[in-house]
Amino acid sequence: MKQLSISQRPAVDPDLPVFSQTNPVLARIYATRGIHDLEGLGRNLKELLPDETMSGIPEAVERLVTALQRGERILIIGDFDCDGATSTAVAVLALRMMGAAEVSYLVPNRFEYGYGLSPEIVAEALKQAPDLLITVDNGISSIEGVAAAAEAGLDVIVTDHHLAGASLPAACAIVNPNQPACGFSAKSTCGVGVIFYVMIALRRALQQQDWFRQRGLELPNLATLLDLVALGTVADVVPLEQNNRVLVYQGLQRIRAGFCRPGLKALIELSARQQHKVTSADLGYALAPRLNAAGRLEDMSIGIECLLTESEQRARELAATLNDLNQERKGIEQEMQQQALQLLTSLQLDDARLPYGLSLYEPEWHQGVIGILASRIKERTHRPVIAFAQGDEGELKGSARSIPGFHIRDGLDAIAARYPQLLRKFGGHAMAAGLTIRESDLELFQQAFDSEVRNQLSEADLQQQVLTDGSLSAADFNLELAEMLREAGPWGHQFPEPLFEGEFSLLQQRVVGQRHLKMVLMEPVSGLALDAIQFNADMEQWPDESITRVRVVYKLDVNEFRGQKTVQLLVDHLLPA
C-alpha cells in the first residue's frame, strides 16, 4: 500500500576524526550520526545540560521548598501513558526522598475525564484535600483546570513538554522546555525528564539550606530514579539527542547492574528479556506496551503502583495484570486494524487517489487503542492518520500520528484557525496529537485534514524514505560486530539503530508464530548461509516459493538459543530482487 525508497545515508568526510581503535563499520555509523568523539556519545551524567537554563524551575523550587517546610499535602496529576506513569512515579518517589509529609497522585481515567488537568479532575482532586497540585507530562494547555484550582485556593505547578498554545495557564510555576522563551536547548526532553530536572534543582536548594542534615534525612540519590527516566524517555519516542542519550544510557546501565525498581524487574522477567542485557528497544517494545495497556484499557494507577511498590511479590502480581491487559489490547488492536484496512479497501481507491491525510472512524472502536491503530495504519500507508472513537455524547475523540514533514499539532492548529468551531480541543507535538470533534462534523473534518496535509506535503513526501548504513561484507557477519552494535547505543528516534541493506539468495522460508517469516539467506559472494527473521511479515505476500532472490534491509543481531549464540538478521523490509 505504501511506496518505498531505499537509499544509503550520505557519506561522511573520511578525514573527520573518529574514535581510535574503533571498528571501521561502527566508526562509519557514528560519523553519519554526527558523533566523532567520546563526549558526543552522551554517556556521562556530567554532560547533562544544567537545570538553570530551564525556565520556571526557580519558581517551582521555591514553591516546593515552602510546601516541604509547611508539611503540605502534595498531589501529583499524571497522565495515562508510559511517560505519564514514569513521571508520576519519579515525582512521588523523589518527593518522599526529600521528606515530603504526604504526597500522592491522581491520574485521569481517559474514558471519563480525558487528558490533563481539567476542571472535573480538579473537583476530584479536592476530595483528597491537597495544598499543592503538580502536573507531570500535562498541564501546558490546562487553562480552565488551573483556573478552577486557583478558585478553590490551590496553587499549581505545571511540568510538561508538550507544545504551548497561544495562552498559558496562570500557574504559580510552569516548567516546560517548549514554552516560549525557555533557554533549555534540549527541547526533546519528555515529561519524565522535565520532572527529573525539577527534582535535581529541588535537592540542591534543600541541600543549601541544610535541610537533610537538620532532619536526619539521607541525601537523596536521584540517580536511583534513572531507570524510570530511561523507560519514559524511550517510550515517548522523543528524539535521542545527546542529553536524552545520557539519561537513557545511565538508566540502562543501572537496570543491567540490577539496580532498578522491582516493578521494572518483574516486567523484564515477564517479557522474557535478560536484565543484564536490556536495550532501549526492550524498553520501547516490551516494557512500555505493558505499562501503556493499563491506561488504554483500564486505569493507569495499576502501572504506577507497579513502578512504586517496594515489594517484589506485589510487583510480580501487578506485572502479571499488566501483561494480561496487554494481551487483551493486542486482540482488540488486531480486530480494529482489520476493520480499518477493510474500510480503506471499501473506498476502492488506489494509492494515487487515497487521501493524503486519512481520518478513519468506526463506532465500535475502542477509545484506548485508537492511538496504536493510527500508528499501524500510518506505517502501512505512510501518510498522516487520525483514528476516531466515540467519546462523550455527540463527540468523537481522535488520536493522530504523523510522518516526517507534517507537524501534526501545528496542522491541527491551522485547521482550527480556518474553522474556529470545528475542533473542540486538541494538543500534542510533531508526530502525535489528540483531538475532539463533534460526530456531525466528521466529514467536514476529513476534508479539512486532507486539504491541510496536501498544503504541506507533496506526492514525493508520501513515499517512505528508508536510510541504511550501506552493505556489509561477508567478513562483517560475525558475533563480535553484532554484539558491538548492540552495545553501541542507546539507539532510538533520530539516533537510529544501524540498518544495512543487501541482496541475498533466499534458500528457505517458513512461517513461525503465525505472523513471522523465518528464512535462511545466502550471501552471494562468499556463499555464507545466514539465519534471518521478519516479525509481523505480510502474510499476503510471504512465503512465496517462486521468489529465490531478495533485497533485504536488516539489523545485525545475536540470536541466543540453548546457550548458543549465532548471528541473525532482523529484517525490516523484504523485497523481491
Image (cartoon, rainbow, N blue to C red):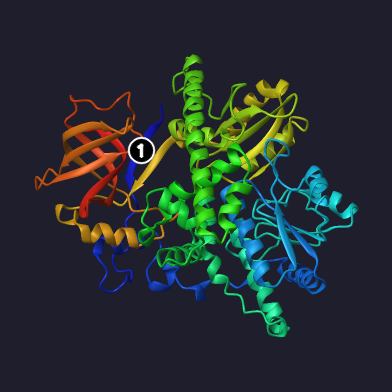
Q: Is residue 407 visible?
A: no
Quadrant where the N terminus sits is top left
Name which quarter of the figure residue 532 lies in: top left
Nearest the viewer among 316 and 191 is 316
Q: Is residue 101 visible?
A: yes
Total labels drawn: 1
In the depicted structure, whether residue 12 falls above or below residue 326: below
432 relative position to 550: left or right = right
In the depicted structure, whether residue 300 falls above or below residue 353: below
Q: Give residue 141's position: percent from left, percent from top.
A: 74, 48
Name which quarter of the figure residue 33 lies in: bottom left
Secondary structure category for the residue under label 1? strand
Residue reaching furthest front?
A: 313
Nearest the viewer among 500 and 404 is 500
The amino acid at mark 1 is: Ser
Q: Give residue 31's position: percent from left, percent from top.
A: 35, 63
What residue is shown at x 25% (from left), y 46% (from top)? 569
Pointer 1 residue: 5
What residue is shown at x 52% (from left), y 32% (from top)? 373
Quadrant where the C terminus sits is top left
What residue is shown at x 42% (from left), y 49% (from top)? 270
Name which quarter of the figure residue 299 lies in: top right
Nearest the viewer among 458 and 92 is 92
487 relative position to 370: left or right = left
Q: Give residue 409's position: percent from left, percent from top.
A: 63, 42
180 relative position to 90: left or right = right
In the depicted structure, whether residue 443 falls above or below residue 397: above
In the depicted structure, whether residue 540 falls above or below residue 63: above
Count residues near mark 1 (Cα–Cα under 10 Å), then give few for <14, some for 14-19, many for 20+.
Answer: few
Q: Give residue 157's position: percent from left, percent from top.
A: 76, 60
